[in-house]
Amino acid sequence: MTTTMLDLLRAHPWIGAATHDDTGVRVRLRPDATAVRPQPGPLVREYLDHWAEVYDFTYASAGDTSVLAGWRASDTGAPLPEEHMTDWIARTVELVLAGRPRHVRELGCGTGLLADRLYPHLTTYVGTDVAQEIIDRHRTRAKPGQVFVRAAAHDAVPADGLPAAAPDCVLINSVTQCFPDLAYLTRVVQDAIRAVAPGGTVVVGDNRHAGLLDAYCRWLERAADPHADDDEIAVRAAARARRDDELNFDPAALATAAAGSGRDVRLAVYPKFMAADTELTRYRFDAVLHVDPATTTVRPPVRPWAGIDDAVAAVTAGPVRVQGIPNRLLDPAPDAVTALELRGALGAVDAAVVLDDTDPAKLAVVAPAAAAFTPVAAGPARAHEPFAAFVDRRVGEVVRAACRRSGINHRGLAVTVERDLPRGRIARAAAAAVDDADATGLPAFLAEIDHVARLAMADTIAAGLPGADPADAEAIAEKLGVAPRHRWILRRWLAVLAEEGMITEDGGRFHGLRAPGRAALIAAADDLDRRRRGLHYPPELTRFFQSAVQYLPALLRDEIPLQALLFADGETSTAEGAYRDNAVNRYVNAAAAETVRWAAGWHPADRPFRVLEVGAGVGGTTADVLGALTSVPIDYLFTDVSTFFLNDARRRFAGRDGLRYARFDINADIGGQGVPAGELDLVLGANVLHNAVDIGATLQGFRALLRTGGLLVFVETTREIPAILTSMQFLMSARAGGDRPGARDRRAGTDRIFLDEAEWREELSDAGFRSFLSVPGPDHPLRATGVHLFAALA
């Protein structure tokens, strides 16, 4: 490979870095090339333009007469029967109108299959589509209250000329298959959720189910060759699935997207209820997201399938969920039924047929019908994303063009494209740093510490609620003599205890405290030493927590600073245990190191790898990250607000070249502390960003310091932890005249300190970061601890 060829690649607007080895060329894309926010990057736009051209051609070829243009059977290629499509339309209209909307916005309205049928039931309807041909056609025949706009699913529709009322239903029907990947799906779904009025719905219909992609491909291959043996069909089906050019995903992808919207959302997932046996009926599903519902969630008991008569009797008798029902279109079981048959058997019973939440080839019935809607939560999702293959192909074309310009023979040249942070590699390195016994046993031990912390809260508060009369937080604080700067901590304690049912809250007044008594608290705290045995959890950290519990009343009164317990006799062993010498931090520090090692592997040899570490403290993460930077020269600025930690680090890392030390405050002007803008390769922070007074401003400041493609890596807690509330949280109380963390961001007025995972992603996106990563994922037991490693590219 020549330097000229690599220089050509590095100069390309899509490419952030390029290198080569014996296996071929490795290319790392710029984050903005595949970004979906704030606007789609050039590769995303090119992918979407391809689909726009397909539909423009389809609509233009069909002329002005056929509203069923483009609807063909996958197995035969023949147009789908009109009777079947009429059934499909009727079921979709029924799904939309079930929410009784008056103002519908449809993304991807196409030929108007749904627009005219919904119209008699609505006050306003706004339809968007990427195909100008179809929008022009709709505008010539629009009825009063109908507006048609040329726009992609991600586009913000201009307010001029639109109805004043916010939509109470956003409809995204039979278009998700044209989306490039889950990132784009997430953006569209979240934007729709944020646009819809409270109590409204987002209907995401006619989606291809990723869990049924293999079955779908086998079905097609069997239709094409009825006499082939099963092994041959399996091979062909696997090849077909790999080259499938449409987005497939499962309902968990929608739940994860909705969980990051910042609104209260519940999800119902339905099979298709048409009579005909086609791809649409077999392999697709409908989903309805209910946004900020006024009703409470119904969680009926679960009952296994025992035949249709048993199921009908069960749902007639009362709240129940019957699951594991074999879908006859996909499962040959003798007692299998179709979704339509099951629905017909229910008649007028208040119940709903839904997809089984564990097996897409099975159905479930819930009663009442409202129980179909369950709260969303982020979790592992399955998807087939065609965008990756598209990107590989297009970048391969760029590499081959650069080879031709450089006079290099590109035949047989392997091209590896990295467009995201390597989550799998990072997660594996992190998991390898922790013993299996710690990974499985530590969450239970930490949960026990949290239990003791709640007992300590209750025991301390008991002195402020001596009688049966209710009292508000301020009265309790006065009774306990809580220092003004710590009263927010007391308010959080009361909220935690109320959530656990250990105290009753009525209109801001508290009563009915269930405190175990001092003897029970002391016994539970002392028992932590026994429970810790066999785990890699520092005894100093356990003793620190036990001391904090003992001195809680004095800590609240500000008679003892927490630092006196954390750094007893000037020693840092407790802080090191908190930030380095325990299994949780070994996991996240190993993840940080592997992330940095990956970034260093792309680094050019003609300049040092420039790092700013903020809030470095005892250097718990520093040591691991420095170990990942042995292959490149470094310019590493170790910073903290405390000279104590800077002096300690000078001694500890005295033998390492390339380190500098300075004070740096994340709540001061980020750009005014001597670090040049646009030159850093890495900003690193462990357990410090939650201290930002305005997290958005801090992240924007970091983004300005990083070069394009630079990396932000940080460790953060993503949930409220009772053990921290009774110890480390005292460090976060503002001094007189100062601001508490979060005083000028989304946490203002809430007494919250920690952002959850979805909130971090949103803040990072708003600050201009791309390609987010967080570990541990839902598949690792340490996720329960609530401590995450985050990474994002500038």
Image: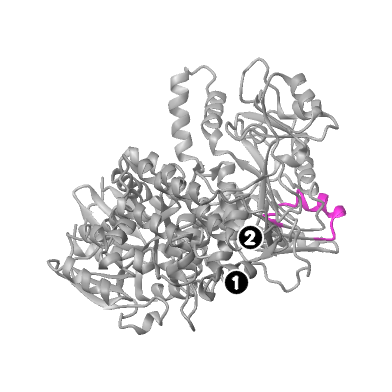
Report the number of numbered marks.
Answer: 2
Q: Residue at x 44, y 20 (%)?
A: 231
The numbered mark at residue 28 is none
Circle 1 SS class? helix
Q: Is residue 740 above or below residue 788?
A: below
User: Of label 1 and label 2, which has the lower sequence position?
Assistant: 2
Location of residue 753 in the rendering, given as x and y in whole percent from the top left corner: 50, 65
Q: Position of residue 105 (x, y in %)?
A: 73, 59
Name the kind of residue labelled 1 in the image: Glu
Q: Nearer the viewer, residue 469 or 731?
A: 469
Q: Quadrant of residue 14?
A: bottom left
Residue at 20%, 58% in the rendered image: 627
From the viewer's perspective, is 359 left or right of 169? left
Quarter of the figure with residue 10: bottom left
Vertical side of 593 occupied by 444: above or below: above
Q: Is residue 15 left or right of residue 157?
A: left
Q: Is disc 2 surrounded by few (<14), some (14 to 19) or many (20+) residues within 10 Å?
A: few
Residue 400, visible in the rendered structure: no
The residue carrying pointer 1 sits among few (fewer than 14), some (14 to 19) or many (20 or more) residues within 10 Å by Cα, namely few
Q: Which residue is mark 1?
A: 478
Q: Position of residue 244 (x, y in %)?
A: 50, 40
How is the protein colored in the picture?
one colour
| Highlighted range, magenta | 106-124
Residue sitting nearer the eye, 293 or 143: 293
Position of residue 520 measured from the top left corner of the image (x, y, whole percent): 50, 46
The Cα–Cα distance between marks 1 and 2, rounded to whole angstroms, is: 13 Å
Whether 117 is among the magenta residues is yes
Q: Amino acid at mark 2?
A: Pro
Report helix, strand or loop for mark 2.
loop
- Residue, disc 2: 466
